[in-house]
Amino acid sequence: MKILKMLHVLVGCLALGVFARGQQNPGFISIDCGAPNDYHDDQLDIYYKADTGFVDSGTNMQVSTQVIYQDNRQQSKNLRIFSSGIRNCYTLMPDKGKGNTYLVRASFWYGNYDGKNQTPAFDLHIDVNYWTTVNTSSWNYEEIIYAPPRDYIQVCLVNTGSGVPFISTLESRLLDNSTYQINSGALVTNLRYNLGSLNTYRHPQDVYDRIWAGETYEVWSSISNTTAIVTSTSNDAYEVPLEVLMTATQVPNVTNPLRLQWTSDNSTTIWSVYFHFVELQLQENYIRELTVHVLNQLVGTVMLENLKPVTVASFPVAGLSLNLAIQATDRSTLPPLLNAIEIFHMVEPQNSPTFLDDFNAMYDIKKIYGVIRANWQGDPCVPTQYSWSGLHCSYDSSPRIISLNLSSSGLKGLIATSISNLTAVVSLDLSNNSLTGSVPDFLAQMSSLKVL
């Protein structure tokens, strides 16, 4: 009897452990693409899931045994490749859904998995819009801050004829809506620097799992205040990690501005910059007051107080080059400094997704009948060059499905009620299948249906 009780306790503890681990990282979706199983990354304190259930195409692969130990990240060992179909998509369902802001990050390492030493290039889409082009042989990630218009986020890899698309990890992180301002578009990350240090931080130091790359400059000094900053507290919504804030880059004297510059490939690039400050060395009777300029336009003036984080966000600015300047005001007795910086470029959506009822109906039909077609991925109608086979759409303000041909598709069972939600369909072809039962009444009630 005692042994049985001990077994019950042990099983209960194991169950609680599994439940607790499954509940880790609220607001996170973490997928190790191509991994054979779920696991907990102890270094990052993040629970990663295999990609089963997030995507219904592709093949799991492992990077070459010659390079598998070059990177100690567990997420770099496997990848999923997509040798069939032009567009292959992952579907994420964040708990909070639409109306919220998410950081979405896709990571890639070719790792010579196929032994060809030929790194492919391909496009990445988020929902129905272009995100970026992936073309790198080393470990790399692409990141976007995005507010989805619906309760799902689809990340699609698009074959552009330059090799087989692949992906190593896909991650989504819920952000505070009061931080990054994206309006109707999205912010694509150009860089995120932890200044005055060579250390790189992400989770668990960063609650949002942003990646802060260490960066120093030979012409400027690096300063820090280890003990004081660790004991400080802040309700700052940006929640830049203390490890990042406790170092900074500082110019030599009060009369020198701190200038930074980056260049884009596109003269129409619209930049958005976030400057993160914390005073680390203020002493009595000293003042550090700074002005922040972007492309010679004043963004703001900030008076720094000991150990109190301040973020200055720029207005959107367009140009080929991005020139930044931080200067001390006339009454400042200390020179300019900067603890961390984030630079993004803005993208505006070019396409609108398929009408939601039509979208949901097609995914229900796909699931109910187990339809397998190479291009039945992503949005059914948009972009137009990737629309699903067997259907035609109208393209007004919100694309609608107006024709659906499921002839000879191996359909079995009753006619799915989901079809009734395709209220704009004019032509419906269900011939040459193994459907059973009577013709449902809802077909007669579809006001747009002319051809059955």
Image (spheres, rainbow, N blue to C red):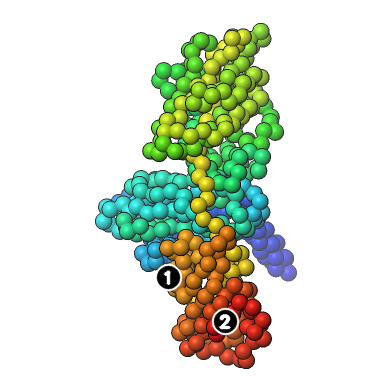
Residue sitting at 62 percent across and 91 percent down?
438
Q: Considering only order in the chain, which callout, 2 or 1, is on the residue closer to the N terminus?
A: 1
Q: Residue furthest left?
A: 116
x, y percent for residue 81: 39, 60
Compared to residue 301, the image places residue 234 above or below, namely below
Q: Which of these two is toward me, 244 or 253?
A: 253
Q: Which of these two is toward me, 12 or 78?
A: 78
- Residue 222 can be seen, yes or no: no
Name the kind of residue labelled 2 in the image. Lys
x, y percent for residue 159: 37, 59
Q: Are marks 1 and 2 in contact (CB under 8 Å)?
A: no
x, y percent for residue 205: 58, 38
Residue sitting at 59 percent across and 79 percent down?
449
Residue 374 tag number: 1
Q: Is residue 372 left or right of residue 316?
A: left
Q: Is residue 229 left or right of residue 84?
A: right
Name the kind of residue labelled 1 in the image. Ala
Residue sitting at 63 percent across and 83 percent down?
443
Compared to residue 27, the image places residue 360 above or below, namely below
Q: Quadrant of the image for the N terminus?
A: bottom right
Disc 1 is placed on an element classified as loop
x, y percent for residue 87: 43, 62
* Residue placed under numbered mark 2 in the picture: 450
Q: Which of these two is toward me, 103 or 260?
A: 260
Residue sitting at 54 percent across and 35 percent down?
316
CA neighbours of label 1 inside 10 A, class few (<14), some (14 to 19), many (20+)? some
How far is disc 1 from disc 2 in space, using C-alphas? 29 Å
CA neighbours of label 2 inside 10 A, class few (<14), some (14 to 19), many (20+)? few
Q: Quadrant of the image for the C terminus?
A: bottom right
